[in-house]
Image (spheres, grey):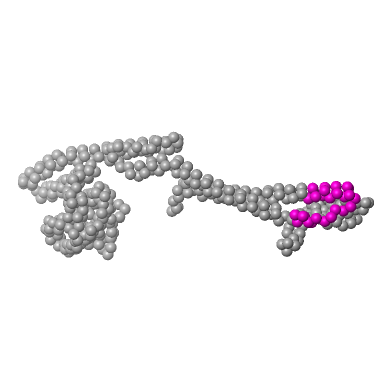
Amino acid sequence: MRRKIKLTTLYYRHIVPVVLVLLLAGIVSSYFLVRRILQGELDAILERSKSRIESYIHTNHRLPEINTFDDQLILFRKAASMKPSVCSDAMQYIPEQQKYHVSRKLVFTTMLNGELWEVTVTQPLEGTRHLTILIVQMAIVTISVTLLLFMLIIRRILSKIWKPFYQSLQLIEYFKVDDPNRPAFPDSNIEEFRLMNAHFTKAAENANRDYRNLKEFSENASHELQTPLAIIRSNLDMMTQEPMTERQSQLLSGIYASVRRMTRLQESLLLLTKIDNRQFSAIDDIRVDVVLRDKVQQLQELLHARNLQCRLELSETSIPANRELVDILLNNLFSNAIRHNVKDGVIHAQLRPNLLRVSNTGAGEALDGSRIFRRFYKNPDQPGNNGLGLSIIKQICDTTAMQVEYGFDAGRHSFTISW
């Protein structure tokens, strides 16, 4: 699985290395450019010294006195032939600093009283090098500060530009199909964001419309089933009072069982519709431990019929919830634990201040945790189940801001409700 990354982070990953490379290239280029310019200036100084020396010899017909002013060193020696002027790097010893420095050297020949003289003028590069380093340091500081300000400004600009995008995502994240009000997406002058918001709005409207249609269908189907089911049950009751053969009795029993399943299904669908419509809005402060004890007492006959042992481990706990929904939740939890238990099995209910766990012994392996709370999901070993009991538990938890989790350990199935 590929690691998730934000678009702005990806942008910085691409732009920062490029800017750093450009910064480094700019610093190196600045160093060599400044060094070349200053070296050119130093060569010009040497050329001016050459002109002064030649002018002095031409005027005074003698060699000038050696002058080491500004660390410039001038040497004279006789030459065998005329040579062109040559400017090059050299090493010059500076007595005051007692070390050698890189210098620029100009060598040329001149005529004095019919004799050729070779003149060497040397000028240290130390001052130029210090000036070059200083200029480069200033460039580094300037470019670094500029880069930092650039990154801060870009971050601020990107944050402002992408703000409508993240606001739209947040609205979509908290959008619920049962909310009649469509999300109010932020207005933006960016064409791509406007297009995205238009698609989001259309998708939200479609989802809301489909949900309303499905809800209306479920409500209508549940209500419309009540009358024919009541008529069928009434007629079946009347038929059972008539004399009939054994075969007819068997067929009638099968029909009666199917009608009972349809009745339970219709009641469960109607209950889910009521929960979806948030018709259970009254909130009370409920003592869960007291309600649990009463519920187990009501189920004693079912427990004895299956020879099941129910162990309670309760702590005093109160939660704000709808009393009817809590009763339905507990009914489904314990009905599930009884229906899917084994003979002489155990049911264990643990109540803590922030959770309720109901576990039961059971045959078979763990159920599919990713599908167990889906509507009409049935255990192959329980064909008579309508597949809505656990869906009702999940729907109640979602409506009341609770969480439900399924677990299986050492032959025990458990459902944990936390709040």
Left or right: 283, with 207 as reference point: left
Closer-to-camera residue (228/248): 228
Residue 361 x/y as whole percent: 22, 62
Residue drawn at x 8%, y 45% is 237
Q: How many marks?
A: 0
Residue drawn at x 32%, y 42% is 175
Residue drawn at x 86%, y 52% is 109
Whether the magenta-drawn stretch holds residue 50 is answered as yes
Residue 396 x/y as whole percent: 23, 49
Q: Which residues are magenta?
A: 46-73
Residue drawn at x 21%, y 38% is 220
Res 52 seen here: yes
Residue positioned most to the right: 114
Closer-to-camera residue (218/343): 218
Res 387 seen here: no
- Write down the quadrant of residue 336 in the picture: bottom left
Left or right: 78, with 96 as reference point: right
Q: Main SS type for the magenta part?
A: helix
Closer-to-camera residue (159/123): 123
Left or right: 223, with 35 as reference point: left
Residue 65 x/y as whole percent: 84, 55
Image quarter where the C terminus lies is bottom left
Whether the magenta-drawn stretch holds residue 177 is answered as no
Residue 352 x/y as whole percent: 23, 60
- Write down the quadrant of residue 162 in the picture: top left
Up/down of 107 relative to 180, above or below: below
Left or right: 359, with 121 as reference point: left
